[in-house]
Image: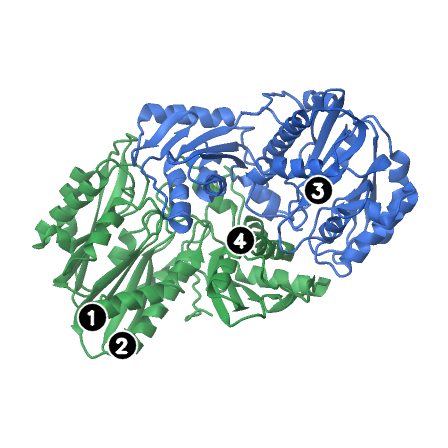
Chain colours: A blue, B green
Amino acid sequence: MPSTNLTFTSRNAHRAWLATQAALPAGFRVGTTRFEFTPREAPKPAKMTLTLIALDQPTRDFGAVFTRNAFPGAPILVGRQRLREETLGAIVVNNKISNVCAPGGVETAEKICLATARRLGLSGNQVLPSSTGVIGWSLPADAMIAALPQAVDALAPGSILPAAEGIVTTDLYPKVRRASVGPGSIVGIAKGAGMIEPNLATMLVYILTDIAIPRAELRAMLVRAVEPSFNAISIDSDTSTSDTVAIVSSSKVHGVDLAAFEAALALVCRDLAEDVVRNGEGVRHVIRVAVKNATTNHLARSLGKVIVNAPLFKCAVAGNDPNVGRLVQAIGKHVGAFAPETDLSKLRLRLGGIEIFASGVFQLNPEKEAALVAHLKDAELYASAAPKDGVYAPAVDYPPHERCVEIEVDLGSGPHAATVFGGDLTHEYVSENADYRS
Amino acid sequence: MPSTNLTFTSRNAHRAWLATQAALPAGFRVGTTRFEFTPREAPKPAKMTLTLIALDQPTRDFGAVFTRNAFPGAPILVGRQRLREETLGAIVVNNKISNVCAPGGVETAEKICLATARRLGLSGNQVLPSSTGVIGWSLPADAMIAALPQAVDALAPGSILPAAEGIVTTDLYPKVRRASVGPGSIVGIAKGAGMIEPNLATMLVYILTDIAIPRAELRAMLVRAVEPSFNAISIDSDTSTSDTVAIVSSSKVHGVDLAAFEAALALVCRDLAEDVVRNGEGVRHVIRVAVKNATTNHLARSLGKVIVNAPLFKCAVAGNDPNVGRLVQAIGKHVGAFAPETDLSKLRLRLGGIEIFASGVFQLNPEKEAALVAHLKDAELYASAAPKDGVYAPAVDYPPHERCVEIEVDLGSGPHAATVFGGDLTHEYVSENADYRS
């Protein structure tokens, strides 16, 4: 179950709620600027937003986890070095170009960090860079450095919303989640599975807090919080070369209970992760798979991932079609290929709380079928409409509700469980990624 | 490269060529019948085709490989037993319902085998059953048994085409490939990735030969032929619960060289496998990935599979968009997650013969970009057209050509290689699997 059960009837209602989430913790300022430039590899004008997140004073208490893709972007390579630095003073984020395997990518990232640092009275290695966008193109370093003063001038405390809006690409809406812990707070923002033009989606997440948590504990908590949240979602099984989840504490608020902080951090991560899926490219249904009573944690997690990534099942969900044969197929293909020793005789499957499989056979009838269709329709975020030009676009730019397609996979054979989130496979996804040239 | 380089400008031209492929080897007859029935689980009329492949005399020389899905269909369970029998006399195939995890599925399959056997003067365990279609529904045994006499009456030598047409679901066209070896021949038919109504695709392949090859050799050759052909393709990563490749020799022709037979069998399997991909659901580009100089065969094969299953790259190909960043992403996600010890520093990538990545960086410029677009367009089977009702359908019901999107992944670090075939991800795929209720 989500920690919230929000519904929004309009973009304005959603924006008003975002404003209630967006108060910056003490000790941070954010600023953005947007400018036009011409990429070297594809010479036609494009726009980029530069986002700065600055601390009033550099902090020792920060951490990050990065992509496991074997071709990490240059900002990831630089970011891994930053984790070894004494302190962090700022984060500089650009969209539009991801700076992955581009000639001289690391040097360019360092150059932009240095220019940012000079404007903020820091050294270059106190600045964490992040980039998202087209893979393979080169960052326009000169244009970015020329734009920096505007971003610095825009730096302001108060709201994180400018940063939440600055880091997006084709996200339909900004994503902000907060939690208060005693007199302090945790605020996270996420850039989800969208692109300015079709290209690899990147997930960027920045979590800010004013609560003083020593670096070692902060980093350990982040790793634990990321596992059941960001590492438990999948839009399309593709792993970005730039994924980043960073956490920074300004350490202004002392004396907060560590366990209370960690619980709040886990909640912020889980809600943001679910937001990323809900705003995933072309997603019209969020699918939540709860795998229970598995012999290993790995089996529980991987089975959930396989289900939310099975193209035929995803298409069925898109069509509000309770084609449960495809669900059983997905479980069987994974177990058959990767865990053939698994005993599936006790498998029970529920969709929308309705038992559909037990004792090795389907448990179906026309009445259940009707109830399953109703469950799928209830979880639909918006209805798909065929456009005249064949290029499908989402009908909403806000999240109408937080209901999911609920799948329970009970293996009946062990103590392990995992919950995984994913989306359906829709015409809107194909339009986003095939109907426009990158 | 394909063993053929066929082009067809019309359905009639393709059918005329199929007729040249379809001569049945000596000792076989095929017959089909089509009838209406009402499924128990979803009470509205549906149609089924029953296909019989009968030997003039039962043979010891037959074999089959089956799905590795952990929920194999009832015909698979029965088929595994048949491999232990002395002889095989006939194959009975139905489409529309796959008989997977349906209550009493094995008993129903055996009942239909027995009824078939009685009509043909065989015993039930001399009949191999196959089913494809909706998962979870029950076979209409009474209606099938009532229809059997018509299929038996239709049995005729001469052409395998009635069987190639009888086993399909939403395949656009029947698939037949042959090879002559000395005075004998091998003829194979395949049912590919299509469905009468959206449901799990099943691959069914039947290879008939009149060349006498002892059972043990025949089965060993089949396993070897299946690896680089049917086990090297993927439409959507979903593994059917019913996949079957069966081979049957009538043993009429003796004295053929074993090595010549095996080479011909490999060719028939490879061409049929490529046909299955070319006629895959919604496929508008066939993608051939040749992975070279890998440290292990497993890495070569799995890397190829990951590339042809990466949704974002598949969408880019659908849009004739050489978004090579998505290709590198796919390689990086697999190596990062499953083979992090792999040295990628020597990786060279070619698309359509054009080098796009070497020495750790992209090798791109506007001229190459134009040539890459031209390669993708040349490999397109048909252009997608936006329909008024939003339900996309293929523009052809024959294979216009055999050109592929050619990808070469040279790892530069070992002796192993593998070639994998897949397709793009299109609106036609989503329409096939989401826009109709199953």
Give A293 or B67, whichever is nearer the viewer.
A293
Q: Are marks 2 and 3 in contact (CB under 8 Å)?
A: no
Say which element carries label 3: strand
Task: Tell me what residue is drawn at x 37 percent, y 36 percent.
Answer: A413
Foreground label between 4 and 1: 1
Q: Chain of mark 1?
A: B
Distance from disc 3 to disc 4, alpha carbons, whole Å, reads 45 Å
Say which element carries label 1: loop
For label 3, the residue is A64
Distance from disc 4 to disc 1, alpha carbons, whole Å, reads 47 Å
Q: Which mark is residue B258?
A: 2
Q: Chain of mark 2?
A: B
Foreground label between 2 and 3: 3
For label 1, the residue is B214
Distance from disc 2 to disc 4, alpha carbons, whole Å, reads 44 Å
Q: Are marks 3 and 4 in contact (CB under 8 Å)?
A: no
